[in-house]
Image: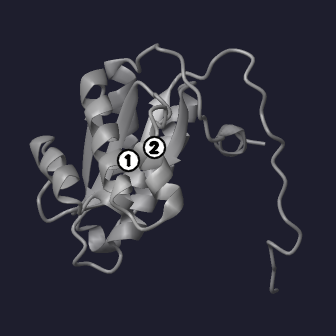
Amino acid sequence: MNEVLKNMEARHSVRAYTDRQVPAEELDLILRAATCAPNGMHLETWHFTAIQKAAILDELNEAIKGAFAKSNNPLLQERGHSTTYCCYYHAPTLIIVSNEPTQWWAGMDCACALENIFLAARSLGIGSCWINQLGQTCDDPDVRTLLTRLGIPANHKVYGCAALGYEPEGTPLKEKKVKEGTITIVR
């Protein structure tokens, strides 16, 4: 099996991280990989915001929890009032991927970019996890104020985030199994 396919098979979601920060050079490579993703009509209307400052990550988590606390959904309300909930699993780096929602393919462009982020991170020995909570809460006024302060364009919707960091040694991995009936080949 070639190295690209091995990297794809080795990629997995990481939900616990050490305090070790992703080095600037490797973050730059990961962000470059994001911009190499396919995108509708090559318009590149997306935006990538990388946050490595712990205080900002904490502030973002609190804003998301505040939005959840206002929800009618009991699970989200519980998370919103939790003192331990952290939507990004305390990863030292978070990349927010946003786009102009006026194009119907904006979310797909962001999904392709996020997959490139995850694969690039894995190839560098960095763990990652797709984070959806900001996409659910980016229109909350308090969350939007923070996003604007972070440089995310006001006309953008957040389509997903990538938590990045180093997985603790000895973390057990779940065995990947493909559900029966997942693949159909018509020849």
Residue 187 falls in image quadrant: bottom right
Which quarter of the picture shows residue 63? Answer: top left
Q: Nearer the viewer, residue 3 or 17?
A: 17
Task: Indicate left or right for 114 with 98 as reference.
Answer: right
One can see residue 107 in this view: yes
Disc 2 marks which amino acid?
Ile
Going by the numbered disc 1, the residue's amino acid type is Ala
Residue 61 is situated, as x and y percent measured from the top left of the image, at 34, 39
Instruction: Judge by depth and name the residue closer to the eye, 79 or 149.
Output: 79
> Label 1: which residue?
34
Observer-nearest of 83 and 147: 83
Q: On screen, 136 above or below 133?
A: below
Confirm or deny contact between disc 2 and disc 1 (CB under 8 A): yes
Tell me the residue at 33%/59% (across/down): 70
Measured as percent of width and height from the top left, residue 158 is found at 30, 58
* Residue furthest right as drawn: 180
Q: Which residue is mark 2?
A: 117
